[in-house]
Image: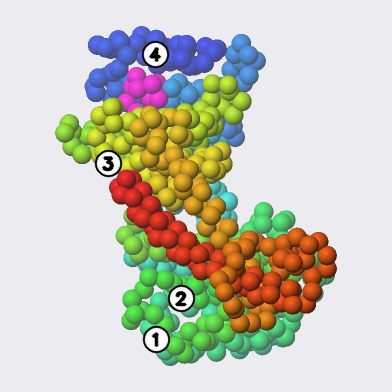
Amino acid sequence: MEVFKRAILQPGPPENFALKTVQEVIKPQKQTKLAQDENQFLENILRMLLQEFVSAAVSAEKIMQFGQSIDSNETTQGHIPRLLDIVLYLCEKEHIEGGMIFQLLEDLTEMSTMKNCKDVFGYIESKQDILGKQELFARGKLVMLRTCNQLLRRLSKANDVVFCGRILMFLAHFFPLSERSALNIKGVFNTSNETKFEKEPLEGICIDFNFYQTFWGLQEFFSNPTSISHAPVKWQKFTSSLSVVLNTFEAQPLSDEEGDANNLEEEAVNFSIKYLTSSKLMGLELKDPSFRRHVLVQCLILFDYLKAPGKGDKDLPSENMKEEITSCEERVKKLLELTPPKGSEFLHKIEHILEREKNWVWWKRDGCLPYEKQPIEKKAVPEGSKKRRPRWRLGNKELSQLWKWADQNPNALTDPQRVQTPSIMEYWKPLADDMDPSAGIEAEYHHKNNRVYCWKGLRLAARQDLEGFSKFTDHGIEGVVPLELLPPDVRSKYQAKPNDRSKRSKKEETKGSAHQVEENQIATTATELDGDGIRTDTTATPMEFDGASVPGTQGGTPTPEELHKHSSDTDVGQEAGQLEAEAEVEAGIIDGETDADVDLDTVG
C-alpha cells in the first residue's frame, strides 16, 4: 500500500510508472500480465487503499478532492481520482483484470454520501469512452449496471430528478441500443404510484369540490391505462371526467401575461415530479401553465398508448372508442397550442417525441431485434467456382471506367496521349483486312459480326464520310469501307459502274421529257395526222423554233397553212418520242432490278 501511495504522489501521466509500481508490489510471473491469483491479491490491496482514503476524508470535505497534491504542471488532483486513473490505465492496457476499475467504482459509491456520489458519477461520465471499450465493457457491464441501479434506489424520485436523469442517460449511452436489461418487455405499469387527495371538503375553502375530485381522479387512469382499454364502463367514466376538465380549461384560458409571470426556465431547477393535491392550491394550480401542460401531456400519452401499433385485433379499440379518442386528442392539442408561453412550439416538440416513441414500441413488440450490424466478412471463393458477373455502377464497364479515369486524372481531357476519335481509314482497317480473301479469315470472326463495332463505325461515317455512309443501304456494312483500303479485286464489287451512272441520268432525263410531253399535249389542240411523224427534240417548248425550221418560209414570216402543218408534224414527233421514252424507262427499270439482284447476290 505504501508503494501505491508514493506512486499517487508522482507527477506525470500514469503510463510512466503504473506498470512498474504493480511489478514492484506483486512481482508477477509474467512481466506484462498478471495471473488470476495475482489479480485477486492486487484487487484486495486497491480496495483497502480506497477505503482508507474515504475514511480519512473529513465529513465536510469532498472525497474526490481529498489529499490534493501538486505535480510538476501545477495542477491539483485528489488522491482518489489519481488512484482511479492509474487503475483505469492498467485495465485499458490489459496489464490487470479489466473488471477491477468497475469494482472500485462500486465500492466508492457505496462508501460515499449522495452529495459525494454526484462527484463520483461525474468522474464516471468523464471516462465513459474508455469504460465503454469492448475489452472493459465485457468484463464490467453487469457491475456498472448494479452500481447505477443502487444509486437510483438511493435517490429521491421527487427531489433528485436531474441526477436520476443523468444516470439513465449514461446507461443509455454506455449500453448498446439492443440491450434488453432495462426494458419493460411485458409493459407492466407502476400501479403503486398512487395520487392521494382529499375525500371530504374542508371548511372555509371556496372551491368546487366535485371538480376537485374529478380532476385528481384522472390520475388513477393515467397510472394504469390497461384498466380502461378493456372495460367500457371505466372508459365512459374517464371520458366524462376528462370532458369536465377540458371544459374548465377552455372556459378559463390563460393570457400571455399569466404565461410570462411563470418563468418555466427558473421553475425547471426546482422541478418536482408530483404536484401537491391540497384543495387550497386548486385555484392557483389552474392558473399555472406548467401544471396545465403536465396534465394535458398525460392525456396525449394515454391516447398514444391506446392507439399503439403492433397490437392484435382483440387489443385494438373499437370504432366508437377511436372516434372519441380522436375528438379528445384534438381538443387537448388545441389547448396545448393556446397555453402560453410558446404553445405551438411546445406542441410540436411533444408530437415529435410521441412519434419517436412509436418506433420504440414497435421494436419491443418485434422481440427487440439488435440494432448493431456486424461487418461482413469476405468469403474466400473456392477455386473452380463460377464467378459472379460484376455489376457496373454506370451501366457497363466502359462508362464506369471512363468515370474512374475522369475522377483519378483531372487532366484526362487535355492529355495528348489520351484516347481520341480515330480517322475513317484507321477505324475501317480491321474490316478491310477481313474482306481480303488472301487473308484467309473465316466469316464467323469478321468484324462485321460485332454489333458495337458496326454501330460505332456508322456513327463515325455519318459524321466524316457521308458518301460512304450512303452505300450502307445497297451493300451493307462492307460498302461503308473506303475503297482505298480494299484490294482491287474486292474494290470492283463496291465501286459504282459507269453504265449504272449513265442509266441513272438517262432515267432522270426521260422522266423529265415525258412529263413535259404530257403538258404539251394538254396545251395543244388534237388534230388529224397525215403521213409519218417527224422526230423532234422533246425538251423544246412549242414556241422554241425559228423560221428556218419551218419548210417553205425561207426566213420570212410563215403562212397560216404552213404553221398548221408544222404543228401537226410536231405532235406526231412528240407522240413517237413519248413512246420511245416510255419503252426506255421500262427497259431501264428492268435493268435496274436485274442489277440490284446481282449486287445483293454478291454481297450475300
Task: Report the number of discs.
Answer: 4
Left/right placement of residue 482 relative to residue 508 reads left
Amino acid under label 1? Ala
Residue 580's x, y, as percent? 50, 65
In the image shown, does 538 or 436 lie closer to the viewer?
538
- Say whether residue 112 is visible: no
Considering the numbered disc 4 on the image, is that residue within a helix, a strand or a loop?
helix
Considering the numbered disc 3 on the image, is that residue within a helix, a strand or a loop?
loop
Q: Which residue is mark 1?
A: 231
Residue sitting at x 46%, y 30%: 484
Left/right placement of residue 2 relative to residue 81 reads left
Q: Which residue is mark 3?
A: 388
- Mark 3 touching mark 1, by CB under 8 A? no
Q: Which numbered disc, 3 or 1, marks the residue that appears first in the sequence? A: 1
Residue 447's x, y, as percent? 34, 37
Q: Which residue is mark 2?
A: 307
Residue sitting at x 68%, y 78%: 524
Query: How much space separates mark 4 and mark 3, taking CA atoms?
Result: 53 Å
Residue sitting at x 68%, y 81%: 525
- Mark 3 touching mark 2, by CB under 8 A? no
Q: Which residue is mark 4?
A: 19
In the image shown, does 240 or 532 lie closer to the viewer?
532
Q: In terms of image quadrants, where is residue 63?
A: top right
Q: In terms of image quadrants, where is residue 274?
A: bottom right
